[in-house]
Image: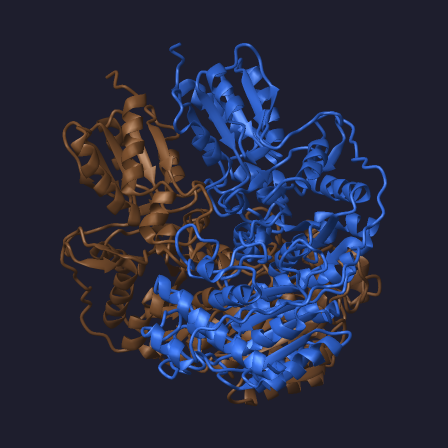
Chain colours: A blue, B brown
Amino acid sequence: MSDLELWRELGQQLRVDSIRCSAVTKSGHPTSSMSAADLTAVLLAKYLRYDFDHPENPNNDHLVFSKGHASPLLYALYKAAGAISDEELLTFRTFGSRLEGHPVPVLPWVDVATGSLGQGLPIGVGIALAGKRLDRLPYRTWVLCGDSETAEGSMWEAFEHAAFYELDNLTAIIDVNRLGQRGETMHGWDLGSYVDRASAFGWHTIAIDGHDLEEIDRAYAEAIATEGRPTAIVARTIKGKGVAAVEDKSGFHGKALDEADEAVAELGGVRDIRVDVARPERREAHRFETKQLELPRYDVGDEVATRKAYGEALAALGAGRSDVVALDGEVSNSTFAEIFAGAHPERYFEMYIAEQQMIAAAVGLQVQDWVPFASTFAAFFTRAYDFIRMAAVSRANIRLCGSHAGVSIGEDGPSQMGLEDLAMMRALHGSTVLYPCDANQTAKLVAAMADVEGISYLRTTRAATPVIYEADEHFEIGGSRVIRSSDDDDLAIVAAGITVHEALKAADFLANDGISARIVDLYSVKPIDADTLHATAEATHGRLITVEDHWPEGGLGEAVLSAFAESEERPRVVELAVREMPGSGKPAELLAAAGIDADRIAAAARELVRASAVTA
Amino acid sequence: MSDLELWRELGQQLRVDSIRCSAVTKSGHPTSSMSAADLTAVLLAKYLRYDFDHPENPNNDHLVFSKGHASPLLYALYKAAGAISDEELLTFRTFGSRLEGHPVPVLPWVDVATGSLGQGLPIGVGIALAGKRLDRLPYRTWVLCGDSETAEGSMWEAFEHAAFYELDNLTAIIDVNRLGQRGETMHGWDLGSYVDRASAFGWHTIAIDGHDLEEIDRAYAEAIATEGRPTAIVARTIKGKGVAAVEDKSGFHGKALDEADEAVAELGGVRDIRVDVARPERREAHRFETKQLELPRYDVGDEVATRKAYGEALAALGAGRSDVVALDGEVSNSTFAEIFAGAHPERYFEMYIAEQQMIAAAVGLQVQDWVPFASTFAAFFTRAYDFIRMAAVSRANIRLCGSHAGVSIGEDGPSQMGLEDLAMMRALHGSTVLYPCDANQTAKLVAAMADVEGISYLRTTRAATPVIYEADEHFEIGGSRVIRSSDDDDLAIVAAGITVHEALKAADFLANDGISARIVDLYSVKPIDADTLHATAEATHGRLITVEDHWPEGGLGEAVLSAFAESEERPRVVELAVREMPGSGKPAELLAAAGIDADRIAAAARELVRASAVTA
């Protein structure tokens, strides 16, 4: 069989298998798979370098389906490559199958989960960055994109960053099949609109007929030969190509074909072509030089912002570990990621004001086992919540640091105040949420984050706050610290970050009134130290105050309540939190206005003790 | 004074006032204001049509500072227009002042809050859409953009949609001052890079020297004369222009000037030019014809998806109210917004797969008092969380509907499952979070949402579920419904949406075991019906099960816990929620695997009753 014949037959096989597997549960996206079948057939047979027996080989190319709903096509490719059996292919979308509705890295050949559109290309930018700047290996990243998803702004963040970083190892294949879920896209088959946009953003562009195998072949060759910038192959395709009943017709998105057997016959029947995918050359990935890991140490009583400690600890971690890398969204002089950038410029990536691309790049970097830390203002992680959510589905290991948490930032006002970040980050599967109150604690937690699986998040404070822990103290994830207690405490105040310092002051005020307050520093908001909380409630007559620089919903207060939900003894919990929209002002004014400063904590404590007279 | 002289002097006054007001608290962004002073001086003096005495006048132009950190300039403009006094100007960033660090609509001339970059232009698209398609008035929308913020993908969603909707009433003024917060932007002073991108996206573009008053004048005239597409004025400017100590220098972003008095002197001293801003012609805004509002009615026992009821109710609401409009993110055949689109095509806006632009457009539409409902999959609102967060700071009234909530969607898998939406939406100031379980309830809540202030969110279910309420039942926001109870209930199950139906089945199973379960339909997750919950706990021996198709954090379970936090009696609460990463499968398989189906609820109930033997 000639190459052309092979590609043509393989394309038909991919269509047939997309239809067959979608027929099993009568769900899936066969028509969106059929448009890209020829594009991917040529890629698999001639251009992809991939060792399916060793998906962990760092030299492998990466194939990302940004249009994740074309999963039938991806799985059909895996079958053609011999990675999965026809039997497994037909488990598509059934309970317990690895072949989920949209690709997830439960499959060893899938780098990242896709299915929320507009994410695969930005993640591809991260993988390509790793190849070019970190691993320094010649692997290529191929991203199959839908035309509909170019409406997502995140795609243009990716176009912008890929060009800026001169990622000529990255190829976007835009499958312009004209039809979205509910009708035509903005641009239909106007390939020029895509070409013009991508060119303006600095990409090399090639417009082709996505069903002309020779044009496809030449386009890939041209992409590989292009130096200094990424290539976008803009391919005119036909949705449902090859089956007259659905070809180029609206109303068949995300639907299995009604007459699957007839469609398979129309495509020439079931085939079992097996492609021997070329393997990459084995080379060693680059590693950076390291020296002894020495975390910064701070003297008790000094005033140091935890955001500053983050930057210093991260730079120290980078010195001690070759795999640590950092990204920031154009605020590195505020988050103090600039300290890392100064110390390890080769391992720092400026993502400008593009938080979605920042998270996506972090996800892409960890695909190649780098250990990314990404920082911006806590508030601006909301910009990338879908990317963080999908990173959890990707089982990605990424570390995030949000500075400028809460009203305590002061004059900048509510647009810059992270007041929902704890809720947002807690509500992710398997996440870790940390909120240190002092510089030594921050340093220890930053170091611990490097080895945490999943999404870990560190919340830092803008203001300089007193160092209260010795540099030798150990802080583990999932722990807490009782920092003030007596044998006869009247109540406990559970705080974290900035409110620990307010709680300590409140305890002094209360002591003057003869009220003894225990203070718990709940620096690990998730996982939470339920044992210490239970012991605390028991020792303090079941009287707790939680205090957080955050909205009342989903944060520290509710985390504490959940820790007691099923307990035998359930304390009374007064949740102090930010309940009115803040404005500008001095930090102390805003903490007072929000009812979370020392005075308000003390007042709430007096009221709690008064209202719940001890009967024990 | 000639026009040119006036503009020159006014530009200097705006610089001087930006410096003076930032000097008060030694914070703010004077240098970012100074770059755009000449651009806005000409706009205010010659082109803006605005009645400062009547900011509610629907004929007013709109001036949006997408670069919200240039608030000193905005407030200096207000002073020049006579809207605020010099005395008030000098309250900038002090506690209690209306002149916050970033603009908020506490000021009557501010339409929306800005300060999270990349939002002003997309919101401007919404305002311009209102002008062109709904109000049908000739007002113009002027958006001052920073160059740094063009890195945000949301800007390109705006460029795309503005061109698609032919918004020639929209002008973006890009202040290319070259310097971001921590250094140079990607493109520096390469105006061509901005011109090429905006042109490729279909805009008319004009590159100018942003300090040449005649060029500025001509550019505005050209923008107004341009028909059929929006205009981008790409202006080369100098950050800190006019003060040698800071002009075009890095390191002065977001900093008050050290030597304010000297800087003011260098700029020629304090001025008090008052501009008589031109007022718009008074015209009547268009209104759509309405007829009687008749909500859809469903028969008890029929199976109807709440997402379908959303679409039908919204279409009915649109028939009854002229002000209701709808938007969707290219999934209207899934959310059923297509029913509204079919009934009221003039009031429906397809936002394609651009959720950030969708929310921003909704915010822009409500600026002109339209009542927008925006829908997509619940999961995909995570894409726009920063926009929703800022909409709350904007005191915007927008209504959101998220379909395909939870694991019960089935085969599509976790990328499409809204599992964090309750947490995300609860953690917004003043938000309303609704989760109906049947079609009649949905219809009533959709109608109620039209009159709710702030951000309201409705969570709908993919599957058809039985209608359990009569069409005449009334449901108010903040309420709940006890749908099964006896005088001697052993425990209560608190559910909402899909889990109400599972809870009802569980109660049947439990009845067979002699366990009597009360069922509470907590359709209003926020505000929550604390009174009914308290009465329920009291009547059921303090035994509660909460069950939700959502992660355990921040959702229904924790909302219930918060309702009891400070109570005298605090029930034991078993929180059933999704605790493992789901895959694909049939809805029933996934509900079972997540431990939230009828069988698992019944098992948890048996265990709860066993573990907490009644002592009362």
Name of the residue lying farthest toward the front: A1
In front: B256, or A144? A144
Q: Give the tally of numbered discs.
A: 0
Residue shown at 56% from the left, 90% from the top:
B225
Residue shown at 37% from the left, 48% from the top:
B590
Residue shown at 54% from the left, 81% from the top:
A8
Quarter that holds the N terminus of chain A? bottom right
Q: On screen, A338 above or below B528?
A: below
In front: A22, or A493? A22
In front: B610, or B471? B610
Residue shown at 56% from the left, 33% from the top:
A597
Indicate the position of residue A443 as horizontal and vertical percent values: 72, 36
Residue B313 in sight:
yes
In-image side of B417 versus A235 (left or right): left
In front: B154, or A195? A195
Q: On screen, B509 above or below A542?
A: below
Residue B110 in sight:
no
In-image side of A454 versus A554 (left or right): right
Q: On screen, B530 above or below A268?
A: above
Quarter that holds the C terminus of chain A? top left
Indicate the position of residue B112 as horizontal and vertical percent values: 50, 63
In-image side of A38 versus B90 (left or right): left
In-image side of B119 versus A362 (left or right): left
